[in-house]
Image: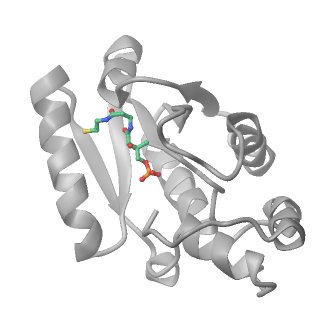
Amino acid sequence: MMKAIYPGSFDPVTNGHLDIIQRAAILCDELIVAVLDNEEKKTVFSVNERMEMLENSLKELPNVKVLAFDGLAVELARRENAHLIRGMRDIGDFRFEWEAAQLNKTLGKIETLFLMTNPQYAFISSSRIREIARLGGNVSDWVPESVQKYLLRLSRNNTQDSFSRK
Ligand code: PNS
């Protein structure tokens, strides 16, 4: 039985994340999408909103469930007796992911499995999507329709949200 956890911020979930989830769900018997709920990591959307966006997009995948987590991803993986799964967009992601995978292997003897991001999504990130949406751009190629509704709110409020890769 192959069980895996796909941890992330999902602020918001993008079609790039969903592509990884769909492909991972084929490889696993059970996939848990674990949404980081950590006050130190500021997000634009609340953990409930981020989970809602994921759940709305994953209704057709019976072996995928969504939960919130606080603390170390590796501890969650140990508790669930699962591997970790991460997407890798490009060489820019490699350094961060390599370090995290080595730490998680050392901390909890947990393997991280990587799926290469589909090239059509390799240049998008949640933060870019938020930025474009906030400035009134069209993000319909990169997020599902249900997520676009949440993003509309950013454009009305015009909140501060400086750029990062995630
Ligand atoms: O979507 P993101 O922001 O790239 O996800 C990063 C995430 C949530 C996977 C990472 O920050 C994480 O695992 N945080 C939980 C705390 C933890 O385990 N830190 C040690 C990482 S080696």
The image quadrant where one finds the N terminus is top left
- Is 10 placed left or right of 7 in the picture? right
Where ligand 1 lies, by image quadrant?
Answer: top left
Percent across and percent down for residue 105 are: 14, 32
The relative height of residue 16 versus residue 135 in the rendered view (above or below) is above
Give x and y (percent) for residue 48. 75, 34
**In the displayed structure, does residue 139 sit left or right of residue 129?**
right
Which residue occupies 15% across, 49% down? 99
Q: Is residue 106 left or right of residue 48?
A: left
Residue drawn at the location 18% of the way across and 21% of the way down: 108
Q: Quadrant location of residue 18?
A: bottom right
Which residue lies at the image location 53% right of the left edge and 47% below the top edge? 9
Q: Position of residue 17 (x, y in %)?
A: 55, 59
Is 125 or 159 nearer to us in this picture?
159
Please identify the residue farthest to the front as the structure is shown.
Answer: 160
How are the colours assigned in the image? one colour
Query: Hey, which quadrant is residue 4 in on the image?
Result: top left
Question: Compared to 25, does 98 lie above or below?
Answer: below
Above or below, 143 against 86 in this view is below
